[in-house]
Every structure is written in structure tokens, then in C-alpha cells.
Amino acid sequence: MDCAMKTPRYTALAGSLPATVPFVGPETQERAAGRPFSARLGANENMFGPSPQAIAAMAAAAQDVWMYGDPEVHNLRAALAQHHATTPENIVVGEGIDGLLGYLVRLVVGPGDAVVTSDGAYPTFNFHVTGFGGTLHKVPYHGDFEDPAALLARAHAVGAKLIYLANPDNPMGSQLDATVIEDMIAHLPQGCLLILDEAYIDLAPDGSAPNIAPDDPRVIRFRTFSKGYGLAGLRVGYGIAAPDLVQAFNKVRNHFGVGRIAQAGAIAALHDQAWLASVKAKVIAARQSFAGVAQENGLQALPSATNFICMDCGRDGDFARRVLQELGSRGVFVRMPAIAPMDRCLRVSLGDEAALAIFAAALPAALNAARG
Ligand SMILES: *Cc1c(COP(=O)(O)O)cnc(C)c1O
């Protein structure tokens, strides 16, 4: 035995991966700064919070948390099936969309397999693709929108197994028409699965979701309790897909990944659609008030179908990064798109009146400091 051999003996793939940290969270920044942020507007969390009924259900479930949750997530899948007028066999529940993306990529992507996404789109997906050895092909945004025609063309050219598209989009907050998505599905290459990430659909204009048969084998659409339902810390998301694909997740998923409290909270949140509607109304109002603050400061608020707004700072990425830095040093946590030319913008999550006031107070000074 070679005593110099290092342990653990990583796979060639893991050994080749860069030592990246996918997200530097606000908590990390707070520890570094030695104080908490006063306005947490960077992670698209829903400050209006979850349904009180969900909180009560989670508190009650806490009494029983010595038991594992149901590994088949039966009751939540049944409730979701009813909500979407489909069957539980069309619903897979997991540890947020992020967790489900990991399982899906693990099921479909092996070393060298081609995957297509947009340059600057949701980075967690890319992280999973790289982690399973896939080859990422990125197409540019078209203006402030993801570009279905370019995604399709690239997928055809490289023989992609997966295309990733978020609609409404993160980080830009833009939304493509339902008909554009439906047309995209009609033109997918043979054997290419569309991942339609609808994390923000609960907050988008009514009737803007595309019409897709749950049994359509060409698409999996992902939804989450993290955004509209205000349960980001709970970690519950779901996919709507053909039964064969839903079944395949059982080969690789963590069977107790969705905990007992999480299942109870999600069921109660789903049943309280009145709360979701009230949150959506607050988000729509906040789009107006936050856009107003942007405008007062000479920034352009881009149209948003989500609970965040991109604010165009009118200059390049270096300037926007300075503004972001200056906001951070004034206790305001925001993020921004990573790729030019979208990185001319700040991405500001929509908060309550108190957060709005803190943001409105900090922004003029941050802009001044950034202008130097
Ligand atoms: C926030 C977000 C997610 C994360 O969803 P979870 O269910 O919390 O994992 C997924 N996709 C997009 C585009 C998001 O913005």
C-alpha cells in the first residue's frame, strides 16, 4: 500500500472541479462586517412572509418531529395534484427547486453531455451541471430577456439533452409570453428536455403561465414554496412532469429530504390561497414604490413579473458594483446580475415599508459615493 496516497481519493471529476463557493450568503457578509444588515433585499426572499396557517401547521408538526416525514410526500403531492388539476403521479417534491435541479441533472447528464442555458441565468443550475461533468453551452440574453430562439438553435447544434429557462427570469425580472414558451416546446430538438423554472410564477400577472399538459414528456416545470409562499427557509419545491420522469427521481432522491415540518407547512400554505393573493397584491404595490425610489434617484426600474426589480444604474458593471458595495456598507443587502450588459443593474428584492424606507435613505448616499 502506498502510504503517501492522499485520502479521500476523490473521483477524477470531483478532483477537477474548481473550489468554488456557489453563493456568498448575507450571513457570511454579516459575519465579515461584524454587524447585521438593516435591510435584507438581496436574495429575493419574500419579506411579507408565509401564511399564518402555515406557521401554525409547522408549530404543530414540531411536536411530532421525532418521526421522519412521509418519504412519498403523499399528502402534499395529492394537494398539489388537486391544485394543478393533475395526478400525484405527475408531481415530484424535493428540497426546493435547487435540490430538484440536482436530482434531474444527475438523472440526465453524464460527463461530456451537452446542456444549454443563458449566460447570466440562474447559476445554481450550472453548478449542478458542472458537478456531474456536463458541458455547459451558454447563449447571450436578448436585451433583458432570455432568448428562446437562440437556446433552441444552440441545443440543435450541440445535441443538448437539457435546456434551462427561467420564466419569469432571474436576474432580470422579465417575462416571456406564454405563447413564446409554448412555441419553444413545439420546436425542441428530439430527445431534449426543457427545464422550465417557474420559481416566480405565483407573483407574475394572472394567466401568464403557459399551457403545458402535465404528461408532456418534453418539459418539466419547477415551482417552489420559497418565493410567493414566503417559505424559502423551509426548502420545499416541486416539479410537474410526465409520470415516467417523476418516477425516475425515486432512483436518486434523498427519501427523507423533505422533512415532516416542511411537508405540513407546505400543505397549509397551499391551502391558504387567500394569503398568497394578499402577498401578491403587496408585491405589486411594492413594485410601484421601489420603482419610485429608483426613479427619484435617476435609475431606471425595469419591468418586473417577480418580487424583485432590476434598477438600471445607467453606466457599466464597475459602477453598479460600486453602488452595491456602498449600499452594503450602509447596511443594505442587494445583489446584481453577473454578466454584461445586464450588470449595469442592481437587483433589489421587494420588501415592506420599513425596508423601503431604509433603502430610500441609503440609495442617494450610495450613488454619491460610487460616483466618487
Ligand atoms: C429563488 C430561485 C430558485 C430557488 O428555489 P428553491 O425552491 O428555494 O430552491 C430557483 N430558481 C430561480 C430562478 C430562483 O430565482
Image (tube, helix red, strand yellow):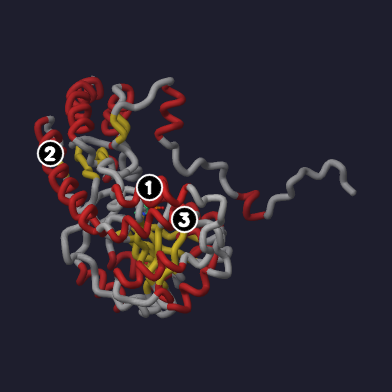
What's the residue type where badge 1 is placed?
A: Ala
Ligand 1 closer than 8 Å to the CB at disc 3?
yes
Q: Secondary structure at mark 2?
A: helix
Disc 2 designates what residue? 289
Rendered image: mark on residue 232: 1
The front one of 353 and 325 is 353
Residue 233 visible: yes
The reply to whether callout 2 and callout 1 are in contact (CB within 8 Å) is: no
Residue sitting at 68 percent across and 54 percent down?
11
Q: Earlier in the sequence, mark 1 or mark 3?
A: 3
Q: Is disc 3 surrounded by few (<14), some (14 to 19) or many (20+) residues within 10 Å?
A: many
Residue sitting at 37 percent across and 25 percent down?
36
The front one of 309 and 338 is 309
Q: Earlier in the sequence, mark 2 or mark 1?
A: 1
The reply to whether callout 1 and callout 3 are in contact (CB within 8 Å) is: no
What's the residue type where badge 2 is placed?
A: Ser
